[in-house]
Each structure stands twice: as C-alpha cells, then as structure tokens.
C-alpha cells in the first residue's frame, strides 16, 4: 500500500499502473490484481487507510473547532501537493467511469460523510448545532465549498478559507 | 453551435469529435478547427452562449428568491439530463488537462462568478446580505454544495436541496 502511494506521488495518477506497483513491490502483477482489480481501487484503499488515522474527528465539545481541525487535516491530506493531484484525477475519472464513481462514493465519500454525521449529531445533542437541517445538507454546506475550490478554482485554498466558510455557515448570510 | 450541442447530447462527450461536428454541420473540419482548437473549447462556447440567456440573474429586490431562480436554472441547464453528463465529463477532463482547466475557469466559472458577485453586491447595498464575508466565500458557500452533489453523490439533486442550502446558508447553522 505504501509502495502504491509512493509510486503514485512520483509518477502521477495517469502514469500509475498495477504493473508498476507490482514491480516496485517486488511481487508479480497477479498478486496485486488478486486484491485490487484496478489502480483506482488500489488508490482508494490507500486513501482509506490514511483516513482511518488522519481524518478522525475529535469531540472537544466545540463543534466549530473540531470541524476546523478535521477540515484542515483533509485539506492537507487529500488537497495537499502529495495527494491533491492524485485525488483530483480520481474524482475526474469518476465523471466518466461509473465503476470508479461507485467505488469513490461507497468506499470514500460515504464513510467519511458518516463520520461527519456522527460528529454533527453529537453537536446537535450538545446544543451547538441547529436541528432544523438535514445532516446531509450541512455536510454539503461545509465540504461543498472545499471541493468547489479544489476542483474548479486555480490555486490551493488555505486555512483562512476554511475559517471563512465556517464563520459564514454558522453565523449565516443574513445581515 | 447548435449542431455541436445536439451531437454532444446524442453521442456523449467522450465520443464527440470535431470531425463529427463538421460532418453534421456539412462543413470541412478545418473550418471548425479554425474557430475552436479542441472539442472542450467548442463545448465551452456552446455552454457560454446558453449562459447568456438562461443563467442571467434577475433583481426583484429579494436576493434569496433571485438566487433560487438562478440556481434552479443552472441545475436544469448544466446539471440536467441533456448537459449534465457532458458538463461532468468536462470538469473531469479539467482535472488532468491544464488547458481545459484554464479554459473552464476563465471562460465559464469566472464569468458566471462575476455575474453572481454583481448580484450579491447589489443585495449588500439593499441590506439583504451580510457585508462581513468575502463575496467569493459566499459564492463557494452557495454553489459549492451544488457541485458537491453533482460531482460526488449518486443521483440528481432537486429544487428542495437548493431550498435547503439557501435556508441553511442564510439563517446559519447555529441553534
């Protein structure tokens, strides 16, 4: 898995191949194919293993602080210079490959969304978050702006952008 | 231009070609290439011409109503069954093709964002929108959730999702 991530960073997503990963790991390509049917599946697994440790939510009792911490970890992990171009390429491939789209959703987007829902529900119980909105609308309101910047606007967004999104989303756009 | 859009809808973005468009229009492919260097450029032009008429903002004096109307027009135009898959494929291609990414940003995302800024600025002057946030943060907060649903979550979003985003964004997530 580590080998796959290292190689992906070196050559980029487009040039990553199961053969290349097998060669680097010193195993036959069939050994790799038995576990991962495609490079997209393998890259998703590698991201998921990073997710387990690096994108967990803390519960300090302050939802905005905890979201800020997790959103910045996500920005550094999947939006940073190492993985950012790889992740963008994967999201790009999902737009014309239904199998990649399904795997991306079921193995990455939905599991991370479920973690977010759990933290948001706790915040509602702690009286820190409105109970008026569907949790998936809140997820889209918080993470949508990050994807929008990541996929459509040139240049990387920074911690100040995350601060501004949190401030506007929590306080609201009314004057 | 109409020919390009009709053909794109019939065959899909992946199979769309300058040659095919030229043949359908009954002109030589060089005639088409002189004006558009790539199918991405041609498709962007076709979208831009639709934008001129269909994605304009009205100013009724009610910013939420006017945003709702424009966001639903965008949902139907670029997220609907006709253009949705083509637009998603174009955003996907932008993730690994810098020339497409630049054209998408400069000729589509930025012009439509500028229209949105103008409407938002008027809303601030009318006392209907907080002046505390950067206009581009507001754009990301409103349109980011739509892109998030469009590119990452299976199934189409509906008018009720746009209503919920507007309600949450304007009222804020605080209890």
Image (spheres, coloured by chain):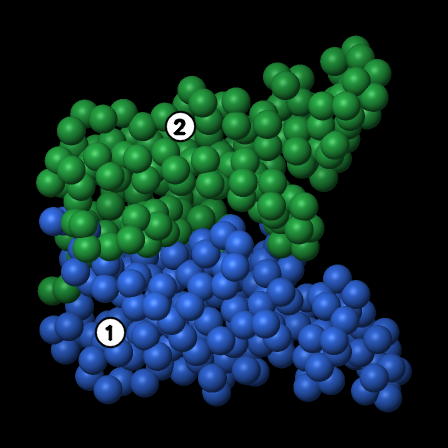
Chain colours: A blue, B green
Tag 1 secondary structure: helix
Q: Position of residue A123 (x, y in %)?
A: 20, 75
Instruction: Please give the residue where the numbered disc 2 appears in the rendered image.
Output: B55
Circle 1 packing at 10 Å, graded few (<14), some (14-19), many (20+), is: some
Which quarter of the figure has residue B39?
top right
Query: Do the residues at pointers 2 and 1 share their chain?
Result: no
Circle 2 packing at 10 Å, graded few (<14), some (14-19), many (20+), is: some
Q: Position of residue B117 (x, y in %)?
A: 32, 40
For the residues labelled 2 and 1, say whether their Cβ atoms are less than 8 Å apart: no
Residue drawn at x 20%, y 80% as measured from the top left: A62
Residue drawn at x 32%, y 85% as measured from the top left: A58
Q: Is residue A37 above or below residue B137?
A: below
Kindly report the distance in space between the C-alpha atoms of the residues bearing marks 2 and 1.
34 Å
Report the side of A30 relative to A57 (left or right): right
Residue at the top extreme of this rendering: B26
Q: Position of residue B132 (x, y in %)?
A: 19, 55
Instruction: Specify the subunit that label 2 lies on.
Output: B
Q: Which mark is residue A85?
A: none
Q: Nearer the viewer, residue A30 or B125?
A: B125
Q: Position of residue B136 (x, y in %)?
A: 35, 50
Q: Is residue A60 above or below residue B128?
A: below
Q: Is residue A133 in sight in this rendering? A: no
Q: Quadrant of the N terminus of chain B?
A: top right
Q: Quadrant of the C terminus of chain B?
A: bottom left
Tag 2 secondary structure: loop
Report the side of A129 relative to A73 (left or right): left
Report the side of B130 relative to B147 (left or right): left
Q: Is residue B162 in sight in this rendering? A: yes
Residue drawn at x 30%, y 68% as measured from the top left: A163
Residue drawn at x 36%, y 26% as measured from the top left: B56
Q: Which mark is residue A64?
A: 1
Count of numbered circles on the image? 2
């Amino acid at each position: 898995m580590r080998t796959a991530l290292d190689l992906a960073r070196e050559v980029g997503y487009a040039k990553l191949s199961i053969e290349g990963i097998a060669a680097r790991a010193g195993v036959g390509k069939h050994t790799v194919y038995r576990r991962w049917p495609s490079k997209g599946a393998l890259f998703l697994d590698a991201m998921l293993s990073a997710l387990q440790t690096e994108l967990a939510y803390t519960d300090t009792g302050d939802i905005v602080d905890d979201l800020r911490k997790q959103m910045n970890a996500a920005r550094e992990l999947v939006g940073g210079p190492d993985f950012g171009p790889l992740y963008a390429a994967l999201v790009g491939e999902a737009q014309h490959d239904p199998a990649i789209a399904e795997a991306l959703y079921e193995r990455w987007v939905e599991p991370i969304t479920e973690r977010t829902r759990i933290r948001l529900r706790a915040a509602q119980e702690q009286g820190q978050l409105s109970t008026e909105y569907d949790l998936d609308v809140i997820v889209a309101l918080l993470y949508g702006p990050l994807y929008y910047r990541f996929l459509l606007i040139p240049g990387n967004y920074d911690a100040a952008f995350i601060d501004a999104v949190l401030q506007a989303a929590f306080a609201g756009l009314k004057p």
